[in-house]
Amino acid sequence: MRREHLIAAGAYISLVMTIAPVSADGTHEPIGEDVWQLPLFDAHVHYKEPAWDRYPVKSVIELMDENGVAMALVSSTPDEGTIMLWEYAPKRIITELRPYHGAAGSSNWTKSDGMDAYLEGRLEQYPHEGIGEFHIRQLDTSDEALFRKIISMAKERDIYLHVHSGTEPIRWLYGLDPDVKIIWAHAGLGTPAPKVYALMEEFPDLLADTSLREYNILGRGENLDPQWLEIIFDFQDRLMIGSDTWVNSQWDSYSEIITMNRRWLSKMPRDVAEKIAYKNAERVFGRDISLEQIGTR
């Protein structure tokens, strides 16, 4: 969808969604419907094997176009999915290396034989700009040797770890190396907002994507959740939105997910909305992001 069509569609959907002009902090005018004029960076996309037939690469980029998503950070199970998207649209996709492949999945990947060699080999072969998204479901300090190798790989290339975990694994990783660069997937997902705030405050370089947090942020009624509002304002330079297309139903609902993100961004002052929508990603990944990328590859 071209830019003029995107903006027209956005104005229509915003009416349907009843985006009210509520001031985010009581003093600054929210961006409101102008949010539809912003390009988006989707910081949490997966293109897993079950999606390949149902959503061919061309259709994925078309979905991004229809929703004003100029660029995306992609990791996949297996990594071949990410590479397929990147090869089709290299100007629109930033690649991450997910450890999951073969029998190595989210619950056992750290115990998989040869995991360090697999990661090293894929990093040498492709221009990945992150390692992850990977899960640390329960902290097991016996995995320290592997994680030290992973941190070393990331630091050697100056790239991020994209970590799905609670608070303690993040603290543990920083304990292994305080200079490791981390994106906290889903801002902790089930972690309560006060603990999210505390961890972001404790580690001033920690970034987070807000995928699957849309309803937490939107709260009830016309106002955003006050605890999440505090997180957003105090850490506005370190947040990025995301869709988390981990199953096909997320791809089926991609437009609705992106609309929900625009809905809460519409309640932010323009400068805050722009940072979280795309400017933080521009800084983090060294890219120029604009609506001019819509319709390109």
Image: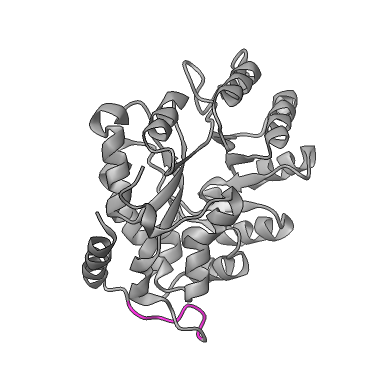
Q: Main secondary structure of the magenta part?
A: loop
Quarter of the N terminus within the rendering: bottom left
Is residue 191 at all visible to an observer of this figure?
no
- Residue 198 visible in the current orientation: yes
x and y, in percent, of residue 30 in the image: 43, 79
Relative image position of residue 170 (x, y in whole percent): 67, 44
Who's the residue at 22% across and 67% down the image? 8
Whether residue 78 sits left or right of residue 239 in the image: it is: left
Look at 61% across and 23% down and name the residue there: 124
What are the residue bounds of the magenta stretch?
20-26
Q: Is residue 267 above or below residue 245?
A: below
Where does the image place residue 224, in percent across and percent down from the top left? 44, 71
228 or 47, which lies in front?
Answer: 47
Residue at image position (26%, 39%) is 59
Residue 142 lies in quadrant: top right
Residue 225 appears at what percent x and percent y? Answer: 47, 69
Query: Which residue of the protein is positioned furthest toward the bottom in this rendering?
Result: 27
Residue 133 on the magenta segment: no
State the residue at coordinates (37%, 41%): 245
